[in-house]
Structures are given as structure tokens and as C-alpha cells.
Amino acid sequence: MPKKSKKKQRSFSLLEGDVLEKLRDLPDDHYDLILTSPPYNIGKVYERSTKRDLAGFVEWLDTTIELLVRKLKKTGSICWQVGNYVQDGEVFPLDIFFYNSFKSRGLQLRNRVVWQFNFGLHSTKRLSGRYETLLWFTKSDSYKFNLDPIRVPQLYPGKRHSKKRGVGAGKLSGNPIGKSPSDYWEFSAEEHFRQQGVWKIPNVKSNHPEKTIHPCQFPIELAERCVLAFTNPNDLVLDPFVGAGTTVLAALKQGRRCTGIDKDPLFLTLARKRIKLLKQGRGQLF
């Protein structure tokens, strides 16, 4: 009797609709990584129909976070990438507002990563903002962290311990395949993984090779670092505000599966186009 063939798992799915409604339909304790950059409530095209005051905005995303925590596996991680909300010239750092949303639900902050970039809007009444933050939370003490795929080169690769050291004398003082990166990230647009001690990722502006019509797009490199570090091959990734599909692209490139949610059909069409280009082996993903 012939063996039954196993049903092939889908590598990705894109869901169109309200984020709260779609999240309620997804299974609990299911995803290995939730990676997203939620809207900042600063009047972008996809926010204009639902612009809220700061308190209402925080409350709405707090409800979203409640659902996201339920969808996350016990061994899972959440990467929450945010910037600042500015009102009447006053800056409100969004990571501060959302820290308690995660902490009150039992999640633990492992790193607050600073993503620095060199381009953005210039300010005339305050210093120009040139960084955003990524909060890495885990649901428990049993979480995945793969250091080797994201190591950066040692500053002095051949450096050895002094002969006076005793135990370990003359041995390499650092890991030969590289050191753990810091929580300050700079990335290079020209090189995918630049060989230096800090990571440089410019934000995706008009001349960036990944630029699409989406007004607030983060680069694939940033998403890939999180995917590599916090998941294993074939793991499930979720982006509840998927936009132009960057998280899905990063997951697929690294052999993971991904679900994305967005209310805008135009952005989902764009995401599907970029995924198709990736599967065709095309370099430009716009």
C-alpha cells in the first residue's frame, strides 16, 4: 500500500484586514518570532483614516500586544521596532510607552537595540533624529538565541592571552569565528554583512536600493539579523503590520515560514511582487 504523502507546509501567507480581527483568528502558542514595526501615529498615508491621540494610540497597540503575546510560543521572542511620536515639537519615545505593555504580561526584555542611520528629516528647532530602537522580549527563560550566524569579526582576530596568564596562556583570547555584536546597530547599504564591529543599516529612503512606495519601510538586513538570531530553520515568524513585506522576505531568505497581516491591499500586492522577485532570484526587491 503506497505511503500517504505529507502535506507540504506553506512558506508564507499574507492576510488582508484589521489586525485585531486577523490576530484573533490565528492559533495561540504558535509563532517562534513576532517581528514588526508598528505604525507611529504620525499621519502617514495608512494612518490618516484612524489617526488617534497618543493615549488612544497606545491603548490600541496595547490591545494588539495582548493578542500577540497569546500567539507566541513559550520559547518565542518579540522584536518591536519603534521610533518617536512628535506632537507640537515635543518628543515622546515610543519604546518607553510600550515597555510596560510587554512587561506587565510577563515578557522579559533581553536587549534594547539602538538602530542608527544617517538620513532623515532635518529639524530646525531641535536636534535631527537619527536613531530608532528595537526591543527584544522573550516569553520565558527558555528562548532561542543563535549567536554564531550574527557574529561580527574580532577587532584583533589573532590576539592571544599572555603567557603569564597560566591556564589558557597563549590561546586565542576571542572566539575565532567572531564576537557577539553590540546592542548598537549600524548597517551598510552597499554590503549585506559588513565586516566590522558595528552594524550599519541606513533607513530606506529615496535612493536606497530596496525603496518601494511604502513610506515607512525598514531594511531587510535588520529583519534578517533578528530572524537568524531568534529562530531556527522552518520556524514560524509573524508580522502583524507587514507593509511592503520586508519581514516575509527576510524569513524566506533564511529558510523560515512567515505570516503577514496588513489592512492595505496595495501594500500586500507590493509584498507579493517582492516575494515573487525573491523566488525568481532577482536582486532588486522593490
Image: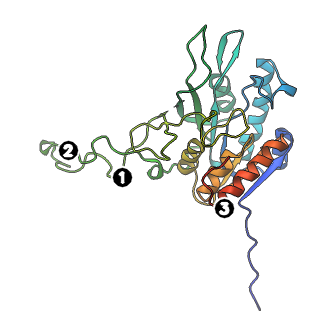
Closer-to-camera residue (180/89): 89
Q: Secondary structure at mark 3?
A: loop
Left or right placement of residue 285 versus residue 8 in this view:
left
**Which residue is farthest bottom?**
1
Q: Is residue 240 shown above or below 284? A: above
Closer-to-camera residue (210/6): 210
Mark 1–mark 3 distance (CA, rounded to whole Å): 32 Å
Q: Pick the quarter of the image with the N terminus.
A: bottom right
Q: Earlier in the sequence, mark 2 or mark 3?
A: 2
Task: Tell whether label 1 touches label 2 (CB within 8 Å).
Answer: no
Q: Earlier in the sequence, mark 1 or mark 3?
A: 1
Residue at image location 78% in from the left, 51% down from the top: 14
Residue at image location 17% in from the left, 48% down from the top: 169
Identity of the amino acid at label 1?
Ile
Q: Earlier in the sequence, mark 2 or mark 1?
A: 2
The residue pinned by badge 2 equals 161
Q: Position of residue 213 (x, y in %)?
A: 73, 38
**Which residue is farthest left?**
164
Task: Tell whether label 3 touches label 2 (CB within 8 Å).
Answer: no
Determine the image quadrant of residue 282: bottom right
Residue at image location 82% in from the left, 40% down from the top: 19
Depth-wise, is mark 2 or mark 3 nearer the camera?
A: 3
Q: Is residue 193 shown above or below 131? A: below
Whether residue 73 is visible, yes or no, is no
The residue pinned by badge 3 equals 280
Task: Tell whether label 3 touches label 1 (CB within 8 Å).
Answer: no
Q: Position of residue 217 (x, y in %)?
A: 67, 37
Left or right placement of residue 84 versus residue 8 in this view:
left
Depth-wise, is mark 1 or mark 3 nearer the camera?
A: 3
Mark 2–mark 3 distance (CA, rounded to whole Å): 48 Å
Mark 2–mark 1 distance (CA, rounded to whole Å): 17 Å
